[in-house]
Every structure is written in C-alpha cells, then in structure tokens.
Amino acid sequence: MGSIRLRETDEDIADLLSMQWMEYAHIYLINITPPYRSLILTELNEALSFQSYFGGNQITAADKAVFRALRHIMEQLTFQEKEKYLHLSRWCNTMQNELENSRMIQFSRSLLY
C-alpha cells in the first residue's frame, strides 16, 4: 500500500493564516492597553508590509475580525501617528471602504513628514 502525501494548497495556507490572525485579534486586540499599543500596531504594520491582507491576497474573516477590533484604536490616532503605520493605515482604509457604512476613519491623502 502506498503512502499518502499531504500537500498544502494556497487555500489551505490562507485558511491557516486566517485562523492565526483571528486568534491574534481575540488575544491581543480586544483589551489592548496603551503600553502595548505601539508594539502591536508596529507588528501589524510589518505583517502588512508584504501582503495586502492578513490572509494573503484577498479579504478573509481574519481581516474583518482584526478591523473590527482595531477600528476604535485607529480612530484615536493622529494623522502623524497613522503615518508611522503606513501599511496598516492603507489596509484600514481599504477595509473600511469594503465593509463599513458608518463614520469613516480619516486618513491623510499625502505624507505629512
């Protein structure tokens, strides 16, 4: 009897990433405290520096979960603070345009500094 070789597909990898980021949102973003805010935003920004969404190249449930958990934090940031997290700000702007019908988070249209 031959052995069965399991092969991960792009869809499998996207599903795994989605689950990972949903868990991340549940653990780290629900009760984010000021001392850790900058660290977490930097981490999220770096994750988005090489991909469009947390699950890869398309919106996943993880993106929706992270956005909902992060929305109130991004609303509180100044334009200058949002600029420090350029990839995260781009992603948030994309997500709010795709998902939200409520008040929009304001982003600068050009770099300030």
Image (cartoon, rainbow, N blue to C red):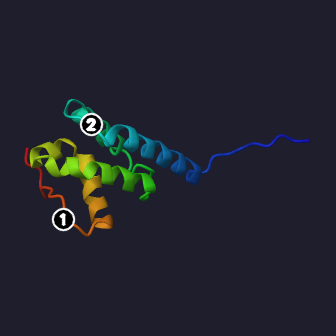
Is 1 situated above or below 14?
above
Q: Amino acid at mark 2?
A: Thr
Can you give x and y, in whole percent of width and height, for residue 48 in the image? 34, 45
Residue reaching furthest bottom? 101
Can you give x and y, in whole percent of width and height, for residue 21 in the image? 43, 44
The foreground one among 54 and 99 is 99
List the residue tagged with mark 1.
Answer: 103
Does label 1 or label 2 sit earlier along the sequence?
2
The foreground one among 66 and 45 is 66
Q: Residue at x 7, y 48 (%)?
A: 112
Is 99 situated above or below 56?
below
Left or right: 53, with 101 as reference point: right
Left or right: 8, with 74 as reference point: right
List the residue tagged with mark 2.
Answer: 42
Secondary structure of residue under mark 1 = loop
Q: Residue at x 53, y 45 (%)?
A: 16
Secondary structure of residue under mark 2 = helix
**Alpha-carbon span between mark 1 and mark 2:** 25 Å
**Image quadrant where residue 80 sits:** top left
Tag of residue 85: none
Select label 1 or label 2 by which is in front. 1
**Image quadrant where residue 98 sits:** bottom left
Left or right: 66, with 20 as reference point: left
Residue reaching furthest left? 112
Question: Which class describes the residues within 10 Å of circle 2: few (<14), some (14-19), or many (20+)?
Answer: some
Image quadrant occupied by the C terminus: top left
